[in-house]
Image: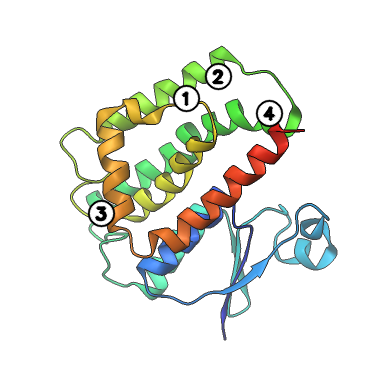
């Protein structure tokens, strides 16, 4: 049976899944979810994902949601032995730490700062921006002397974090002033398989959405 991915192209979490699938050379059956018209709130979607979020993966009838759970699942099932999600306990723990840092600190703080401005018309909050800058400084520290966020090899932590950090380009956050983050960002862009197709196209869609909202 095909592996279905319910997604929205501009969503950073969705792009993280697309990047992981490309790194595994795994073909996904893409199913676009129309959030604007409430497709994610229909009974048939709520049946597979009560949180009514994207992305949602359905593999042989088994639904998984939360992007970081999806990407680790994909490597566990379709990339056994892959460096994308190493099996050695300490190496895996470091990847997990970076993923939890992403969802609990870095991407969360970006969302807390930027999304109320775009989707709620709220003014920029300097305190929230300071928290984003603090998270970027932590990421810069993690990358000191490291090629990737969890060591010498590209992992799902890089793919998740780069999907989120690239979204910063649609905002006023200058993440490239952090030297290690800038170097890492360019490295991932040039080494992640299918980066242009899996992330850049969706990022352009996200930037287009932000620009259209700001023009109103």
**Residue beneath the point at 24% across and 36% down:** 143
Q: Secondary structure at mark 4?
A: helix
Q: Please say if the residues under marks 3 and 1 sit with CB atoms less than 8 Å apart.
A: no
Distance CA(mark 1)–CA(mark 2): 7 Å
User: Can you give x and y, in whole percent of width and height, for residue 175 in the image?
Assistant: 39, 30
182 versus 201 height, above or below:
above
Residue 168, x across and y down, in percent: 49, 35
Identify the residue position indicated by label 2 in the image.
Answer: 128
Q: Which label was assigned to residue 80?
A: none
The tag earlier along the polypeptide, 3 or 2, is 3
Of residue 83 and residue 167, the one placed in the foreground of this image is 167
- Look at mark 3 in the image and give the residue it sits on: 89
Q: Is residue 204 left or right of residue 191?
A: right
Circles 4 and 1: CB distance less than 8 Å? no
Q: Which residue appears at 53% of the width and 29% of the height?
A: 109
Q: Are marks 4 and 3 in contact (CB under 8 Å)?
A: no
Do tag 3 and tag 2 residues touch (Cβ < 8 Å)?
Answer: no
User: What residue occupies the far left of the structure in this picture?
Assistant: 145
- Mark 1 burial class by Cα count in 10 Å: few <14, some 14-19, many 20+: many
Between tags 4 and 3, which lies in front? 4
Q: Pointer 4: residues within 10 angstroms few (<14), some, or many (20+)?
A: some
Location of residue 37 by image quarter: bottom right
The C terminus, quarter of image = top right
Name the N-terminal-most of marks 4 and 3: 3
Q: Which residue is mark 4?
A: 116
Instruction: Please provide percent x and percent y for residue 154.
Output: 27, 55
Q: Compare residues 78 and 196 and report the one nearer the observer.
A: 196
User: Are the two marked residues, 2 and 4, in contact with CB atoms closer than 8 angstroms?
Assistant: no
- Which residue corresponds to mark 1? 132
Q: Earlier in the sequence, mark 4 or mark 1?
A: 4
Q: SS of the residue at dot 1?
A: helix
Query: Mark 4 and mark 3: span between their CA atoms?
Result: 38 Å
């Amino acid at each position: 049976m095909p592996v279905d991915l319910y997604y929205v192209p501009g969503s950073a979490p969705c792009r993280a899944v697309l990047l992981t699938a490309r790194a595994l050379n795994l073909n996904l059956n893409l199913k676009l979810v129309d959030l604007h018209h409430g497709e994610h709130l229909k009974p048939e979607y709520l049946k597979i994902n009560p949180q009514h979020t994207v992305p949602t993966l359905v593999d042989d009838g088994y639904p998984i949601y939360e992007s970081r759970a999806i990407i680790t699942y994909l490597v566990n099932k379709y990339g056994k032995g892959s460096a994308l999600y190493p099996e050695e306990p300490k190496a895996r723990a470091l990847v997990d730490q970076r993923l939890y840092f992403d969802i609990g600190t870095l991407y969360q703080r970006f969302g807390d700062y930027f999304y109320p401005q775009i989707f709620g018309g709220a003014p920029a909050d300097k305190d929230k921006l300071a928290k984003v800058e603090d998270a970027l400084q932590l990421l810069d520290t993690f990358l000191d002397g490291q090629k990737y966020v969890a060591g010498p090899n590209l992992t799902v932590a890089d793919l998740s974090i780069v999907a989120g950090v690239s979204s910063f380009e649609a905002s006023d956050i200058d993440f490239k002033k952090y030297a290690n983050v800038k170097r890492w960002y360019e490295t991932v862009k040039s080494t992640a398989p299918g980066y242009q197709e899996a992330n850049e196209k969706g990022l352009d869609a996200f930037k287009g959405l932000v620009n259209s909202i700001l023009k109103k």
